Image (cartoon, helix red, strand yellow):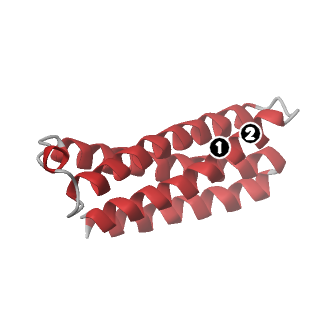
Amino acid sequence: MSEIGRQIAFLSAFLGGFAATFLGILLQSSNNRRHVGWAAGAAAIASVSFIVAVIAGTIVALVVHPDAPANVAKSTFLPQVRGVIFVTFTMGIYGILLSLGLSGWIRSRALGITTSTAAFLAAILISLFVKW
């Protein structure tokens, strides 16, 4: 469980950094189309969701580590933290996919269709993986 918490924290940190960078780029855009605002909003949701997942994953890794102090290892909030990880990591994944899917519409209709299709297919595949 400790290793899973570490891996989730690492992956969330990586994807959260990507989402925050993408958000910064979108906020610098001089384009006033509403697609920019929606994509930026989705990137912001993804970024903050991944930040929470990083902290929750780190807490799980610390609490269940074999060398954790006795008062830390007896924490009773572990099921809630695991739920927070699942919800925030999932929100981050779907938020970043939404942002990427919307980003193509900023440039052109053809690119918008391509990015939306790719994001939609990725969301379906991720949903199937999570279900298993």
- Image mark for residue 20: 1
Q: Amino acid at mark 1?
A: Ala
Q: Residue at the location (31% across, 51% down)?
A: 86
Q: Residue at the location (58% across, 39% down)?
A: 42
Q: Secondary structure at mark 1?
A: helix
Is residue 117 placed above or below 44 in the rendered structure?
A: below
Q: Secondary structure at mark 2?
A: helix
- Circles 1, 2 touching at the beta carbon (< 8 Å): yes
Residue 89: image location, x then y, percent: 41, 50
Residue 61: image location, x then y, percent: 30, 57
- Image mark for residue 28: none
- Image mark for residue 24: 2
Is residue 107 placed above or below 44 in the rendered structure?
A: below
Alpha carbon distance from label 1 to label 2:
6 Å
* Front one among 36 and 93: 93
Residue 35: image location, x then y, percent: 71, 37
Instruction: Name which quarter of the figure residue 52 lies in.
Output: top left
Residue 51: image location, x then y, percent: 49, 42
Q: Residue at the location (16% across, 47% down)?
A: 79
Q: Residue at the location (23% across, 52% down)?
A: 63
Quadrant of the image for the N terminus? bottom left
Q: Is residue 63 left or right of residue 127?
A: left
Q: Residues within 10 Å of mark 2 (few under 14, many from 20)?
A: some
Q: Amino acid at mark 2?
A: Gly
Q: Is residue 110 left or right of residue 47?
A: right
Instruction: Name which quarter of the figure residue 128 lies in.
Output: bottom left
Q: Is residue 15 left or right of residue 40?
A: left
